[in-house]
Image: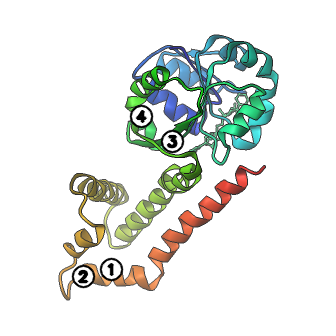
Amino acid sequence: MKYGFIGCGNMGGAVARALSKSTKEIMVSDRSGKAAALAEELGISYGNNQRIASQCDVIFLGVKPHMMRDMLQPLQPILAQRKPMLVTMAAGLTIDAIEEFAAVRLPVIRMMPNTPTAVGKGVIQYCGNDLVEDGVLQDWLRDMQPCGLLDPLEERLIDAASALSGSGPAYMYVFLEALADGAVACGIPRAKALEYAAMTMAGAAEMYLQTKQHPGAMKDAVCSPGGSTIMGLRALEQRGFRGAAMECVLQTYAKNKELGKQ
Ligand SMILES: NC(=O)c1ccc[n+]([C@@H]2O[C@H](COP(=O)([O-])OP(=O)(O)OC[C@H]3O[C@@H](n4cnc5c(N)ncnc54)[C@H](OP(=O)(O)O)[C@@H]3O)[C@@H](O)[C@H]2O)c1
């Protein structure tokens, strides 16, 4: 299977990086030429949108949602002729919208990745239309394995999942940086503080993934009665940490739904 990426920035680039561990049959394109350096680094090829549309079997669409219509419009004749499989990662845009912009019914997978895909720790929800053949889907899933977790999800829930895992790395980085700032304020050197914060987040997440214990129970195991951790938690609760985290996901979800209406 020959893969193409039209748009290869932060997210397309992360997926291309992981996919290149399975196959080097990948061509990427962008407007500025920045993706040429990535292509060279990964040992894949750099082309343009027309070449990708006319040569690739599976084409990832890695442009911003509001650019999708204009990007696909000049490719309509070649898409109608070849009917390659399109894989959209655009926040908010439905499979129906992609078919409308392509002006043809063709196999479409909608996926929602996140940037840790670049290091094999991504979370990717996906769904497809009725034209995606099972054999092709299985080949795609096999090649995508170096990305991380791939989980099938109904299309109506993709915007919600996107608000958690698609956008989530940004929220994690703010928490990570803030925890490290606190440690720096207590006298820990910056590099150590960042490493301790990152390993603590990764370790806590790994414990949950391995044990599936309720997070509240694992939190309780760190909080000695009358101890210092519970005082830290009180500070988080006093400042509305849980409510802020919930509201963060809800507001991202609302914006995702708005993007789909543009
Ligand atoms: N960033 C994330 O964490 C994340 C997570 C989940 C989903 N997504 C989705 O992923 C998509 C890309 O987001 P991003 O953050 O990766 O954006 P980005 O870094 O700005 O990348 C967009 C890419 O599209 C290229 N591009 C724009 N118009 C083009 C055209 N007409 N032909 C060819 N290439 C074109 C850009 O090229 P130039 O740089 O040369 O202009 C750039 O390589 C969006 O739809 C977004 O909703 C992103």
Q: Give the residue type at disc 3.
A: Pro
Residue position marked by numbered label 2 in the rendering = 228
> Considering the numbered disc 4 on the image, is that residue within a helix, a strand or a loop?
helix
| First along the sequence among labels 2 and 3 | 3
Residue at image location 74% in from the left, 36% down from the top: 68
Residue at image location 68% in from the left, 17% down from the top: 53
- Residue 113: assigned label: 3
Q: Residues within 10 Å of mark 2 (few under 14, many from 20)?
A: few
| First along the sequence among labels 4 and 1 | 4
- Residue 147: assigned label: 4
Q: Please say if the residues under marks 3 and 1 sit with CB atoms less than 8 Å apart.
A: no
Nearest to viewer (mark 3 / mark 1): 3
Q: Please say if the residues under marks 4 and 3 sit with CB atoms less than 8 Å apart.
A: yes
Q: Give the residue type at disc 4.
A: Cys
**Real-space CA distance between mark 4 and mark 1, rounded to the nearest whole angstrom:** 35 Å
Q: Is residue 185 left or right of residue 126?
A: left
Nearest to viewer (mark 2 / mark 3): 3
Q: Position of residue 208 (x, y in %)?
A: 27, 58
Residue position marked by numbered label 1 in the rendering = 232
Q: Please say if the residues under marks 2 and 1 sit with CB atoms less than 8 Å apart.
A: yes
Relative to 105, does residue 83 appear above or below in the rendering? above
Q: Is residue 222 left or right of residue 148?
A: left
Residue at image location 47% in from the left, 82% down from the top: 239
Q: Give the residue type at disc 2.
A: Ser
Q: Residues within 10 Å of mark 1 (few under 14, many from 20)?
A: few
Nearest to viewer (mark 2 / mark 4): 4
> Considering the numbered disc 1 on the image, is that residue within a helix, a strand or a loop?
helix
Nearest to viewer (mark 4 / mark 1): 4
Q: Residue furthest front?
A: 130
